[in-house]
Amino acid sequence: MGNGLNMHESQWESLDQMAGSTAAALAQAAAGSALHLFKDEQFRRLAKLEKLSQTEQDRIFNELVIACLVLIMLVLEAPDLRVAGEFRGYLADLKEKVPAAYVDHLKSLGIKDRHLRDWKRVISMRYDEFARSRHDVRAAAMHLKSEEKGLDLEDLSKIQMLVPVQAVAIGCHHHICRGKTDGRDELFKKMLASLSRFYIQVRVRLEGGKITPLKRTRVAVKKILRRLKDRVGP
């Protein structure tokens, strides 16, 4: 009986450690994706970064990192994620560990505790905001699609799959522009393309390489998301 308990505890510790390691890897992937976009010449031109102060540039980079972190969290809880049912509990634990993993990374870089508390607070705020906006994003996408033709099950499946990246792209664009998004459509499209690539990479990794359904959504990304920014508020 004692051995059974020890084995159970060992298995739990192993899963918890695995979740911790995976969360750290996902957090670093988020930072890497954000940095890649931040360094992109077209993004820098569209965001007018060279005209901004260093403080404002840092704020924009931080918003990109947070967007990628929140996107991971939304993917981990997506109801249409193709994973075994018994894996859901692990994903829920992983979702909670991702923001903590990034904050731990910042701590390892010597970031002061008061700034770490700010990071935790803002990540939580953005998650709550982007998660709430999913309902409006889904409704807008369904309305747009229904205007073109009647909705079928495949359409609904594609819309559901695209909701996380739609919500994050719209919200992040709003914050980067400080709410002044008029005339910034090209910047939105650039951000959307980058976040979509990252979104697909994360889903493929979590779904064990099942990329076929995601390939079919890329056309929908181009057709639907390009017009969503004007229809849905942040």
Image (spheres, rainbow, N blue to C red):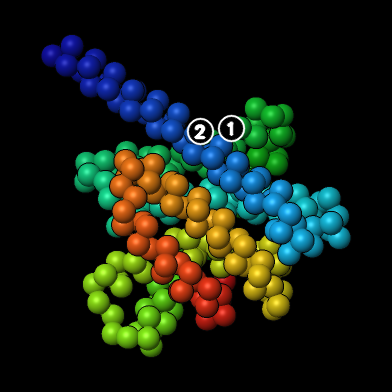
Tell me which residue sits at (59%, 37%) in the image.
103
**Nearer-the-camera pick, 111 or 184:** 184
* Tag 1: amino acid: Asp
| Mark pair 1, 2: CA separation | 9 Å
Left or right of 130 in this view: 153? left
**Nearer-the-camera pick, 120 or 135:** 135
* Tag 2: amino acid: Ala
Q: Position of residue 84 (x, y in %)?
A: 22, 44
Q: Residues within 10 Å of mark 2 (few under 14, many from 20)?
A: many
**Nearer-the-camera pick, 167 or 205:** 205
Tell me which residue sits at (71%, 77%) in the image.
183
Using the image, determine if residue 181 lies above or below residue 4. Answer: below
Tell me which residue sits at (50%, 34%) in the image.
25
Q: Mark 1 near mark 2, Cβ–Cβ under 8 Å?
A: yes
Q: Closer to the N terminus: mark 1 or mark 2? A: 2
Res. 6 image quadrant = top left
Left or right of 42 in this view: 157? left
Mark linked to residue 104? 1
> Does residue 204 appear in the picture of this structure?
yes
> Does residue 89 appear in the picture of this structure?
no
What is the secondary structure assignment of the residue under circle 1?
Answer: helix
Tell me which residue sits at (45%, 29%) in the image.
21
Q: Position of residue 125 (x, y in %)?
A: 56, 57
Nearest-to-viewer mark from 1 and 2:
2
Using the image, determine if residue 111 lies above or below residue 150. Answer: above
What is the secondary structure assignment of the residue under circle 2?
Answer: helix
Left or right of 79 in this view: 116? right
Res. 180 image quadrant = bottom right
Q: Quadrant of the N terminus?
A: top left
Q: Which residue is mark 2?
A: 24
